[in-house]
Amino acid sequence: MKTLSYTKLNEKEVNNVIASLQQLLADFQVYYTNLRWFHWNIKGHAFFILHSKFEEIYNDAAEKIDEIAERILMLGGTPYNKFSDYLKIAKVKEVDGVYTADASLHVVLETLSHLIAEERKILSLASNVKDEVTVALMSDYLKEQEKMVWMLTAYTYK
């Protein structure tokens, strides 16, 4: 018997939530890879601070990737697992050649802005089909990411 038989969510109704979570998963995978790049390649006066901060952020992104994939499974979907699949649907783009604090933080803030917008859409979709678990997950992500935006914006303030 399928998980949805026990959770009483409607399979047809959650299909849009699953599709949106697949998109979010792809975006997070590319974001994670970009964060690794920044962690490895940051240069300049902010190296010691940002090297550690990027590691903290990519570890958080890795946890979210796992949670999103597991939520897709709980809703009856199968999460994508190939990077080639992620790159086909991800709206977050791969970065290369970004070495400075300002440039890397700009990419992180732009990506967070995108993720926040996508999570708000998923929250709305999930709410409409009474998928409170996905609503709670997205709410938790939004709370954390809005604080991160505030902190990074304060750090980059000139």
Image (cartoon, helix red, strand yellow):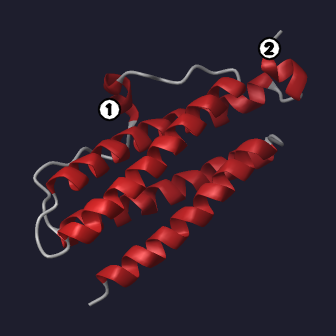
Q: To which quarter of the image does residue 71 belong? A: top right
Residue bearing the label numbered 1: 87
Quadrant where the C terminus lies? bottom left
**Amino acid type, mark 1:** Leu
In the rendered image, the vertical position of residue 121 relative to residue 103, given as above or below: above
In front: mark 1 or mark 2? 2
158 in relation to 99, above or below: below
Is residue 124 toward the left or the right of residue 144 in the image? Answer: right
Q: Nearer the viewer, residue 1 or 129?
A: 1
Q: Which of 132 and 12 is in front in this view?
A: 132
**Residue at 52% in and 33% down:** 22
Residue under the point 59% across and 61% down: 142
Q: Which residue is drawn at 73% across and 51% down?
A: 136
Mark 1 residue crowding within 10 angstroms, few (<14) / some (14–19) / many (20+): some
Residue 97 image point, x, y percent: 10, 53
Quadrant where the image shows the N terminus = top right
Q: Residue 45, position in %: x, y?
A: 14, 76
Residue type for callout 2: Lys
Q: Mark 2 points at which residue?
A: 2
Q: Where on the picture, by quarter, is residue 72?
A: top right
> Circle 2 sits in a helix, a strand or a loop, which is it?
loop
The alpha-carbon separation of the residues under discs 1 and 2 comes to: 30 Å
* SS class, disc 1: helix
In the displayed orientation, state which residue is furthest to the top. Answer: 1
Image check: 155 left or right of 37? right
Q: Position of residue 10 (x, y in %)?
A: 83, 27
Q: In this view, does 18 lie above or below 120?
A: above
